[in-house]
Image (cartoon, rainbow, N blue to C red):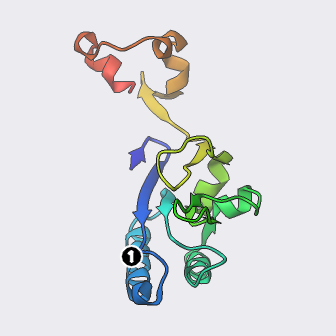
Amino acid sequence: RITSFVESVVFINVYFPYCCNENQENFDSYLGQLQYFYKELDDAKVYILGDFNASAANAFGPILKDFCGENNLILSDEVMLPQSRFTYVSESNGCKSWIDHCVASFSAHQSVTDMKILHDFILSDHRPIMMELVVNCQVAGNGEKSSIFGRVHSEVFKRNINWCRASMIDKSFY
């Protein structure tokens, strides 16, 4: 959870069981737990990201879509990316599928400005989904709200930070 004076943003990473009849009960149970956790987050912008093992081509896909509809969530990756995309490549037979997703609350989805599947970033049989989003991140200063980005000089991001020499005020900006 990232919380500012203006909003709260929550990222939840998930790994759901492989799609097969034996895992149906586990899949449903995980969705139930996720639903309970999500309902506790009130008005936060929520991003649920990871390996859902659910696609339009398997039995878990429609269940995930129903879950999203029932909870006012959006499959942001399906909305923002071309339908011909894939996030998984089987190492044994080269079969491709789209089983990794970004599920978002409506307000979170509205904050996403770009999304891509990084096909050249290969660390496993899954391809990462990268998203860019706008977060309203403000800090208090002299009794007024001001953007953190207006108070942190851009040169800070061009060099390594020596945290041992940083003051408490410097650290509060991060």
| Count of all numbered marks drawn on residues in the image | 1
Q: Residue at x 66, y 48 (%)?
A: 115
x%, y% of residue 87?
60, 58
- Residue 37 appears in the figure: yes
Residue at the far left in the pictured view: 164
Crowding near the residue tagged with mark 1, few <14, some 14–19, many ≥20 C-alpha atoms within 10 Å: few
Residue at the far front in the pictured view: 92
Secondary structure at badge 1 equals: helix
x%, y% of residue 55?
61, 73
Which of 143/101 is in front? 101
Question: What's the amino acid at mark 1?
Answer: Tyr
Going by the image, does 61 lie left or right of 13? right
Q: Quadrant of residue 135?
A: top right
Q: Which residue is mark 1?
A: 36
Q: Quadrant of the C terminus?
A: top left
Q: Residue at x 58, y 85 (%)?
A: 59
Which of 131/84 is in front? 84
x%, y% of residue 162?
30, 12
- Residue 43 appears in the figure: no
x%, y% of residue 170?
34, 17
Going by the image, does 19 lie left or right of 108? left
Q: Residue at x 58, y 59 (%)?
A: 89
Which of 108/57 is in front? 57
Which of 59/45 is in front? 59
Going by the image, does 2 lie left or right of 57? left
Q: Is 122 situated above or below 157?
A: below
